[in-house]
Amino acid sequence: MKKYRNYEESLKERLVDSAYAKEYLAVALEEYEEDGNIEAFLLAVRDVANAQGNPSKLAAHVQLDHQSLHEELSENGTLPFNTIGAILHGLGFKFSIESLEKGPQ
């Protein structure tokens, strides 16, 4: 019988790589643009933060205590936009704006 790897563990290993994490976050943001599912985007941010970060250092960077950061990145978290930006910066990323292919509507 073939052994299968745990998905979460495998994802965490891949998200340690900054290039992979960047693409993962970019896809999550694109999907948010399409369906408005902010929870899925926050899950992606949480996944990257858990894989890459020193949670205490990241919490200090965004001026939250470790427990508050954990709660904000949970499924029930309600992160304000500026905190999401600070978390992304703490992980070495930033938001980016691109033109729509169609242009203004």
Image (cartoon, grey):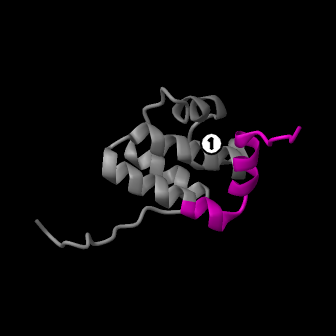
Q: Based on the displayed image, in which of its 4 quarters is residue 2 positioned?
A: top right
Q: Is residue 21 magenta?
A: yes
- Residue occupying the point 41% across, 48% down: 82
Q: Is residue 53 visible?
A: no
Residue type (three-letter) at the residue carrying disc 1: Ala
Q: Quadrant of the C terminus?
A: bottom left
Residue 99 in the figure: left or right of residue 71: left
Q: Residue 21 location, x and y as percent? A: 62, 59
Which residue corresponds to the image point at 61% horizontal and 32% vertical from the top-left?
70
Q: Residue furthest front?
A: 1
User: How far from the left and from the top, in percent, is residue 14?
Assistant: 72, 56
Neighbour class for label 1 at 10 Å: few (<14), some, many (≥20)? Answer: many
Q: Is residue 61 above or below residue 6?
A: below
Q: Residue furthest right?
A: 1
Q: Quadrant of the N terminus?
A: top right
Q: Give the residue number, with chain letter if any, for mark 1.
A: 59
**37 part of magenta stretch:** no
- Residue 47: percent from the left, percent from the top? 62, 44
Residue 43 percent location from the top left of the image: 53, 40
- Toward the top, the furthest residue is 76
Residue at 26% in and 69% down: 100
Residue range corresponding to the magenta coloring: 1-23
SS of the residue under disc 1: helix
